[in-house]
Image (cartoon, rainbow, N blue to C red):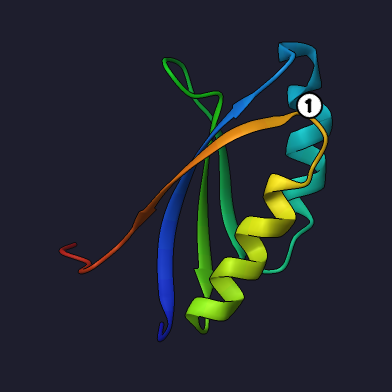
């Protein structure tokens, strides 16, 4: 798959906003997988974007969802397996 792949680690606030945040993010173009995780973050989102601009737009759209407190972005440089 050409383009940019990334993992987004998201914190939500308050915690009772997590399900509406999941519902909103799961509908967005470019979201491949959405996971609820335990630990420092509340969810992990696996995304694909054709260009850096598309990734930037997706990050902006996610950041404006009510309940999203923080996003940490990890861009995948190489798939090993």
Give left or right: position of 11 versus 2. right
Residue in the foreground of this view, choosing between 12 and 20: 12
Where is residue 72? Give x, y as percent.
Answer: 45, 41
* Residue 57 appears left or right of 80: right
Q: Position of residue 7 (x, y in %)?
A: 43, 51
Front residue of 55/26: it is 55
5 in relation to 3, above or below: above
The residue at 73%/37% (across/down) is: 22
* x 22%, y 67%: residue: 79
The residue at which mark 1 appears reads as 19
Would residue 20 be found to the left or right of residue 77 on screen? right
Q: How many marks?
A: 1
Q: In what quadrant of the picture does the N terminus appear? A: bottom left
Residue 38 falls left or right of residue 59 = left
Residue 43: image quadrant is top right
* Above or below 30: residue 50: below
Q: Residue at x 42, y 74 (%)?
A: 4
Give the residue drawn at x 41%, y 67%: 5
- Mark 1 secondary-structure assignment: helix
Quarter assignment of residue 54: bottom right
* Quadrant position of the C terminus in the picture: bottom left
- Vertical side of 65 occupied by 5: above or below: below
Percent from the top left, x then y, of residue 53?
56, 79
Where does residue 73 sit, x and y in percent of width and height? 43, 49
- The 10 Å Cα crowd at callout 1, few under 14, some 14 to 19, many 20 or more, is few
């Amino acid at each position: 798959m050409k383009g940019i792949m990334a993992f987004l680690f998201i914190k939500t606030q308050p915690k009772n906003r997590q399900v509406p945040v999941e519902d909103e993010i799961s509908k967005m173009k470019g979201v491949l997988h959405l996971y609820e995780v335990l630990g420092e973050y509340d969810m992990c989102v696996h995304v694909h974007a054709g260009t850096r601009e598309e990734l930037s737009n997706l990050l902006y759209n996610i950041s404006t969802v009510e309940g999203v407190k923080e996003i940490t972005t990890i861009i995948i440089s190489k798939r090993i397996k």
